Image (cartoon, rainbow, N blue to C red):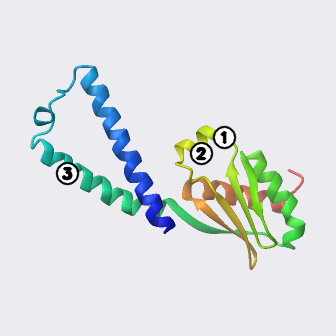
Amino acid sequence: MKYIVRAVKYFISVCILATIVILIMVLLGYASFDVNDLFDQGWKSIGYIAIMFAVISAVYPMFGYKKRLAGALGDFADLRPGVVSFMEEHGYVLESEDDQVMTFRSKSAAHRIFRLWEDRVTIEKALGGFEVEGLTRDITRLVYGLENKLRNPDN
């Protein structure tokens, strides 16, 4: 279900972004306001564009969200303060927690809006460290930083 919600969010955001770009072009006089002049096949072209956006939006969550293992030795309870301080240093706040899972959200409202409220990072206890789940571009940065922080707590 989460996958479908993400795909719909991306479809809507891509459609809004394309509409804004076209409106700017029309307002600046670079394009006609008439759809039949703007696109070669008129309204039929808009259907093709919507299908293309739907395909892109359906595929993106598959690559945009991942789980990665952050290697760390030690007890989860002992490593918890280091994980929380690292995440807070990187703009995240602890949203919820139990004995196996910590969930973080971005502190910045703008960051959350631009990520379409898909800014959640989940850190779950795993064999040999933590399993970190979230946006791929964030997870890569956070996993390397977490591993470094937990191996060298003095830095």
Q: Earlier in the sequence, mark 2 or mark 3?
A: 3
| Amino acid type at mark 2 | Arg
Q: Quadrant of residue 148?
A: bottom right
> Which dot marks residue 108?
1
Q: Is 74 situated above or below 43?
A: below
Dots 2, 3 in contact, CB < 8 A: no
Q: Residues within 10 Å of mark 2 (few under 14, many from 20)?
A: some
- The residue that disc 2 covers is 112
Residue contact between numbered discs 2 and 1, judged by CB atoms under 8 Å: yes
Write the residue at 53% across / 62% down: 65
Q: Secondary structure at mark 2?
A: helix
3 or 1: tag closer to the N-terminus:
3
Spatial distance from mark 2 to mark 3, Cα to Cα? 30 Å
**Which picture quadrant has residue 153?**
bottom right
Residue 47 shown left or right of residue 80 in the figure? left
**Is residue 62 visible in the rendered structure shown here?**
no
| Relative image position of residue 78 (x, y in whole percent) | 90, 67
Secondary-structure class at tag 3: helix
Left or right for 19, reference 143: left
Q: Amino acid at mark 3?
A: Gly
Instruction: Pinpoint residue 43: horizontal percent, then vertical percent.
Output: 14, 44
How far apart marks 2 and 1 lie (CA) works out to 6 Å
Name above or below for residue 27 compared with residue 41.
Answer: above
Amino acid type, callout 1: Ser
What is the number of the mark on residue 69?
A: none
Q: Callout 1 environment at 10 Å: few (<14), some (14 to 19), or many (20+)?
A: few
Residue carrying label 3: 47
Residue found at the very far bottom of the displayed protein: 127
Q: From the viewer's perspective, is residue 145 above or below residue 15?
A: below
Q: Residue 62's x, y, as percent?
A: 45, 65
Q: CA distance from mark 3 to mark 1?
A: 36 Å
